[in-house]
């Protein structure tokens, strides 16, 4: 990723980090009061209820994108700390971008589809 | 010189790092970051499958989640519950310590100003504001553990 | 004067310490431990003890030193698990009877306690640790006044200028261990020291090194470097001030 200054990548790492504190907080708060109940499809606090909650779903979309950037940039940093080399550096960038784009697409398709059906 | 110079560096002193809170936070931040990144990939794929990639039915959801949850241990608690509980703890430490680093490095909160050094010298990580940050991280994590334990095992 | 002098009683204590020295052997490319028993006084240092061993017990023991007073930075080694200057550490103050002495971590060994500082100095050089002016000739040809500096401006960088390049911080840094290309605390502290100097105009030139995959971003402020630095340089603070500069786009205060 030679084109982008490392400080730009890291600035977004920090910004997404702050965003994540909020949206992961929301994501975890929706497990209240019982984790098991929150992953049932029906019932109070269940998944259906969560999908119907616009605010919560907005947070989940932000979570998907922010977490993917934060995780992929973090993974890239770590992989470049463990090893460096001409081919390795390029391979890391390529793999990170492919995995990141893949997650974003799969997640977006699933979430958008789920919202439009419900 | 007849001997060839070694190409390997002298090994580190692990004991130097294992005795300080600061070093533990660093190790934890790196390791939990790597684990959480891998978890994110798995979690997104599994939940997307459970949502049937945009055509959700209660049936697919219950099937996939049931598979992931694994066998029951006691009461409501499954193997999956324990795993998610541990992941949540990683999130808590990574997040709490991450906020500390962001506030300090981005906004400069609690970062001391350079000054004239006098003996005895106190390195900045040992200064009051820095220690307060680190104890705050621990307090936040402990509160989180209490809440998470309730949600996972009691509620 | 003479009466005051008579009042000062210098108490000399003596004790036999065991020194366990980790030695690198370039012939076998391996390490071995040697043990020596040597008597030292409470006013002698680990370096004194090692030199005494070398003089009276084992002439093959290799140690590097020069000033013997904490100024040159030649004698840093890992003593009882912590990197420090052998010439500033007294066996009596360590509190153990057996004292382990090892060569600095994160650096390549040459022989016994002597390490190869080349990588370390290369990194130091890579941040251009000298005064850079936009007009290169000015300081040699047309300087009619000195570059003025106030007390306040001096304090911006003073604490980072005490570095003696001993490498203790570099040996202690967990991130240098993880990434052997990471510039490390010393080089980055030097980058800050010059960039925060109001006479210097080279901050932008140093950016391409400090704002890279091997630059400031690896630091997690564990501060191990600052805790072991014998000169109180606090490299961790310098690195995080640099990060703040890079993130906010404001060059170091000067
Ligand atoms: S910053 Fe301190 S520990 Fe590091 S090389 Fe300089 S004097 Fe030695
Ligand atoms: S011999 Fe010069 S610093 Fe120790």
Image: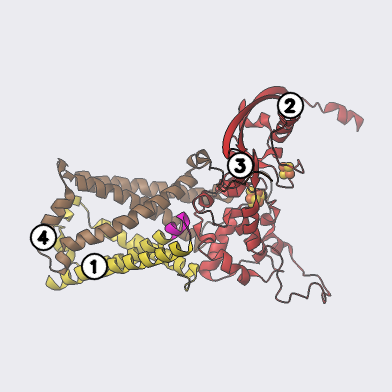
Chain colours: A yellow, B brown, C red
Q: Which residue is mark 4?
A: B60
Relative height, residue C52 to residue A71 (above, below): above
Contact flag, marks 2 and 1 (Cβ < 8 Å): no
Q: Which residue is mark 2?
A: C41
**Residue B69: which disc?**
none
Q: Quadrant of residue C250?
A: bottom right
Chain letter for the residue marked with disc 2 in the picture:
C
Classify mark 1: residues with Cα within 10 Å, few (<14), some (14-19) or many (20+). Answer: some
Q: Which residue is the extreme one toward the left? A: B59
Chain letter for the residue marked with disc 4 in the picture:
B
Give the magenta part as a residue range: A77-84
Q: Which residue is mark 3?
A: C83
Ligand 1 within 8 angstroms of badge 3 C-beta? yes
Labels 2 and 4 share a subunit: no
Marks 2, 1: nearer the viewer:
1
Relative height, residue B91 to residue C68 (above, below): below
Chain letter for the residue marked with disc 1 in the picture:
A
Labels 2 and 3 share a subunit: yes
Residue A26 visible: yes
At mark 3, the secondary structure is strand
* CA distance separating discs 3 and 1: 50 Å
* CA distance separating discs 4 and 3: 59 Å
Contact flag, marks 4 and 1 (Cβ < 8 Å): no
* CA distance separating discs 2 and 4: 78 Å
Q: Residue at x 24, y 67 (%)?
A: A107
* CA distance separating discs 2 and 1: 71 Å
């Amino acid at each position: 990723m030679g084109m982008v200054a490392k400080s730009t990548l890291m600035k977004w790492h920090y910004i997404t980090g702050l965003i994540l504190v909020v949206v992961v907080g929301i994501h975890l708060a929706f497990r209240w009061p019982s984790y098991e109940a929150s992953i049932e499809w029906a019932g109070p606090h269940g998944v259906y209820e969560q999908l119907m909650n616009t605010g919560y779903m907005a947070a989940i979309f932000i979570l998907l994108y922010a977490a993917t950037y934060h995780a992929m940039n973090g993974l890239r940093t770590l992989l470049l700390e463990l090893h460096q080399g001409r081919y390795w550096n390029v391979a890391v960038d390529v793999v990170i971008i492919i995995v990141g784009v893949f997650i974003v697409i799969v997640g977006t398709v699933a979430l958008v589809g789920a919202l439009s059906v419900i | 010189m007849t001997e060839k110079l070694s190409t390997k560096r002298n090994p580190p002193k692990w004991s130097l790092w294992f005795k300080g809170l600061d070093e533990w936070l660093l190790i934890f931040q790196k390791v939990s970051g790597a684990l959480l990144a891998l978890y994110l990939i798995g979690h997104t794929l599994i939940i997307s499958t459970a949502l049937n990639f945009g055509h959700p039915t209660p049936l697919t959801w219950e099937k996939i989640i049931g598979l992931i949850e694994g066998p029951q241990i006691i009461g409501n608690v499954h193997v999956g519950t324990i795993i998610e509980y541990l992941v949540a703890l990683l999130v808590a430490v990574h997040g709490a310590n991450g906020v500390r680093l962001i506030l300090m490095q981005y906004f400069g909160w609690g970062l001391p100003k350079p000054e004239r050094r006098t003996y005895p010298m106190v390195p900045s990580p040992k200064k009051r504001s820095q220690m307060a940050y680190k104890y705050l991280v621990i307090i936040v994590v402990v509160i989180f553990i209490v809440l998470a334990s309730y949600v996972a095992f009691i509620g | 004067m003479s009466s005051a002098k008579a009042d000062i009683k210098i108490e000399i204590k003596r004790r036999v310490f065991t020194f366990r020295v980790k030695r690198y052997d370039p012939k076998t490319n391996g390490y071995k431990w040697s043990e020596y028993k040597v008597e030292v006084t409470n006013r002698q240092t680990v370096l004194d003890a090692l030199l005494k061993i070398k003089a009276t017990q084992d002439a093959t023991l290799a140690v590097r030193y020069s000033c013997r007073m904490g100024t040159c930075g030649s004698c840093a080694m890992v003593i009882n698990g912590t990197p420090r200057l052998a010439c500033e550490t007294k066996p009596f103050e360590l509190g153990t009877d057996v004292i382990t002495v090892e060569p600095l971590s994160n650096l390549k060994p040459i022989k016994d306690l002597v390490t190869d500082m080349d990588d370390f100095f290369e990194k130091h050089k890579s941040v251009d640790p000298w005064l850079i002016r936009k007009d290169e000739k000015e300081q040699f040809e047309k300087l009619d006044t000195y570059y003025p500096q106030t007390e306040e401006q001096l304090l911006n960088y003073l604490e980072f200028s005490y570095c003696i390049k001993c490498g203790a911080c570099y040996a202690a840094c967990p991130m240098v261990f993880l990434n052997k290309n990471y510039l490390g605390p010393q080089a980055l502290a030097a980058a800050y020291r010059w960039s925060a100097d109001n006479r210097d105009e080279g901050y932008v030139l140093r950016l391409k090194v400090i704002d890279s995959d091997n630059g400031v971003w690896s630091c997690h402020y564990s501060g191990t470097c600052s805790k072991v630095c014998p000169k109180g340089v606090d490299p961790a603070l310098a690195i995080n001030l640099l990060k703040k500069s890079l993130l906010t786009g404001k060059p170091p205060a000067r």
